[in-house]
Image: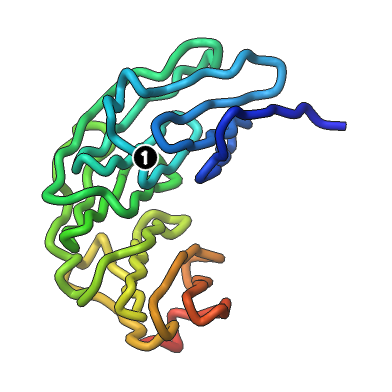
Amino acid sequence: QGEAFSFETNPTMLRTSAAGVTAVAFRQMVQLHRPGVPSLEVGPSEFGYAMVTAFDLTSSSMLVGLDDCKCLLFTLPADHREAPTLAHTFTLRGPVVAVALSSNEQLLAIADAERELTVFSVGSGEVVQKGWGVFHTARLTSLAFSPSAALLASGSLDSSFIIWNLNAPQSRVQEARAHVGGINAIAWLADDAVVTTGKDSCIRWWQLRDLA
């Protein structure tokens, strides 16, 4: 039987990394768990009174979006007994609604409630691409990098998802009527395929060649 953890409040989100770390988000904190190692907690000292609205995790980084228009990037030490360190703080125009880290740990994407979608460099914190969010007509709900990190998928309440090419920023592929009522989540199956789920209670698989 595996190791079990109990919580005083209900978790809201869950992520795992290839390094064996499980991150559990609550309203005002994130806990990091790994079997055989004491759990670590981030927030509320780092978050203030802000609520966690989105987060993502890789082997060496954790990205936490907050409802106070800030997004925090933490570096995870190789020694999982050590606390994460704050690497960058990003300030958006509106509350953060979706975030994503690329699997190669070089890029991160943040979307806010004002439909601003920005891609940053993990290492420098500098903007790589911005302005894509305006091509959605409603709030974004989900972001995901492709396995190669060359593409970024964004889902929205406008019922559509868009595939963005980081190597050709002016190029995009859009499925305008993916889910009636909006998209809840999007994920990559491979560099040429995504899966989506939405408010129409459906899950759908898409081949990029069929969207062109």
Asked which quadrant contains residue 97, the reply is bottom left
Q: Residue at (22%, 45%) from the top-left corner?
A: 120
Q: Does 7 sit left or right of 112 as displayed?
A: right
Q: Is residue 111 above or below residue 80?
A: below
Q: Residue at (88%, 32%) from the top-left corner?
A: 1
Q: Residue at (57%, 80%) from the top-left corner?
A: 202
The residue lying toward the viewer, choosing from 102 and 167, is 102
Q: Is residue 107 above or below residue 37?
A: below
The residue lying toward the viewer, choosing from 145 and 38, is 38
Asked which quadrant contains residue 172, the reply is bottom left
- Looking at this view, name the residue that lies furthest to the right: 1
**In the rendered image, which residue does mark 1 sit on?**
52
Q: Residue at (55%, 43%) from the top-left corner?
A: 14
Quarter of the image with the C terminus in it? bottom left
Q: Is residue 64 above or below residue 166?
A: above
**SS for callout 1:** strand
Q: Where's residue 52, x and y in %?
A: 37, 39
In this figure, which colouring scheme has been used for the structure?
Answer: rainbow
Q: Where's residue 121, x and y in %?
A: 23, 41
Q: Does 191 sit left or right of 21 as displayed?
A: left
Q: Where's residue 100, x and y in %?
A: 37, 49
Q: Where's residue 194, x and y in %?
A: 50, 71
Residue type of the residue flagged with mark 1: Val
